[in-house]
Image (cartoon, grey):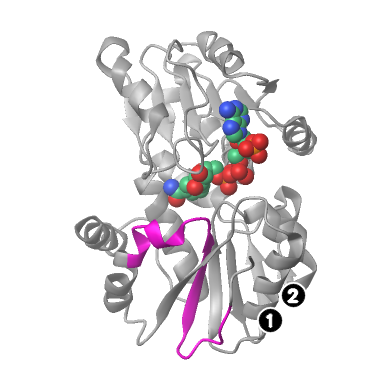
Amino acid sequence: MPPVLQPATKPTMHFIGVTTGQSSINAVFPRWAERLGLGDCALHGIDFAPGSLAADYRAALDFIRRDPLSLGALVTTHKVAVFQAGGDLFDELDPLTRALGEVGSIFKRGGRLHGRAVDPWTSGHALAAQITPAHWAGGAEALILGAGGAGTALAWRLANMPAVAGRPARLQVVDRVPARLAHLRALHATWPAAVPLETHLAAQTEDADAVIARLPPASLVANATGLGKDAPGSPLTAAARFPEGGVVWEFNYRGQLVFLEQARAQEAARGLRIADGWTYFLHGWTHVIADVFDRAIPPAGPLFDDLGRIAAAAR
Ligand SMILES: NC(=O)c1ccc[n+]([C@@H]2O[C@H](COP(=O)([O-])OP(=O)(O)OC[C@H]3O[C@@H](n4cnc5c(N)ncnc54)[C@H](OP(=O)(O)O)[C@@H]3O)[C@@H](O)[C@H]2O)c1
């Protein structure tokens, strides 16, 4: 069933996701709105099952476009689907957004509908909170599990970091959909001076175990599959061995995060540093709220720290 959309009665930011009612943002948003002085406004979740009909995504986008008090939306999980179903409804899409083929932020300026990919930037900010540029100096690589919208955005970010700023020696990406890996390889071929990329098709979970087993020490392992939140399980089996001194990043912060549990079981023995998706959540939401309400919210500094404290207390 497509979601029923009623015209907004006050300035409203929509949130297009799968289980939006369960997100911490519902408790956090009113407090952030107060801190940011956004006035009397609302956050409204629009739930789509993964793989919903293109016509339904398109109807939601067209609704936001036409409804005067609907100011925009944050898109999670369905970023690629929204782009594919309704890319032509946007008046403005920047070249990177078109190339990556995903929309995470929808907003209006002067009556024109804008869409843009935000994960290339927000994943970079979240990564910077976990890894210093010097970390990469010893030849560590990065393994991204999942080549959907968020995994591809992180791949763009890591592959294109200037060498002087520190970056992985190589990028390894695993997915179970050949077309996603082919899309990433085609994109990578257009990135001048990018780090080398290897893609791996994981027909079964053990295939990803084999890739992680070959990583050099201190490598980054990121779970961008959604497994543990959007669907049960982990992209690795319990037998997978994380790299010695590695950095482990689960993109989500809620759900039964099996991948995080697997990492925590090896944390002390293998000297891992582990993070969930909370900092990523903060960067993603502050970035899109800034777009939708046309405010400046820098990704670091006193205001960002304050919003982080408010979110942690409301969570
Ligand atoms: N914390 C945050 O703020 C934040 C920000 C961005 C994203 N995220 C989270 O990151 C996750 C990924 O987001 P997304 O938009 O990139 O989702 P997506 O487009 O659905 O991408 C996930 C990809 O991983 C693949 N996959 C699933 N299971 C796999 C397995 N066992 N082995 C290899 N590949 C597998 C999927 O294939 P199938 O299509 O066959 O399933 C899909 O290609 C979501 O859960 C999202 O909530 C969190």
Q: Identify the magenta region.
A: 5-26
Residue 51 to residue 144: above or below: below
Instruction: Give the secondary structure at mark 1.
Output: strand
Q: Which residue is mark 2?
A: 91
Q: Measured from the top left, where is residue 137 in percent x and y?
A: 46, 20
Where's the C terminus, which quadrant? bottom left
Q: Is mark 2 within 8 Å of ligand 1?
A: no
The answer to whether residue 48 is seen in the rendering is yes
The residue that label 1 is drawn on is 112
Q: Position of residue 297 (x, y in %)?
A: 40, 67
In the picture, the quarter occupied by the N terminus is bottom right
The reply to whether the magenta stretch includes residue 272 is no
Query: Which residue lies at the image location 53% right of the left edge and 58% below the top edge?
Result: 17
Residue ranking furthest to the front: 1
- The amino acid type, in three-letter code, at marker 1 is Arg
278 or 304: nearer the eye?
Answer: 278
Instruction: Assess disc 1: are there few (<14), some (14-19) or many (≥20) residues with their C-alpha within 10 Å of its C-alpha.
Output: few
In the image, residue 16 lies in the stretch drawn in magenta: yes
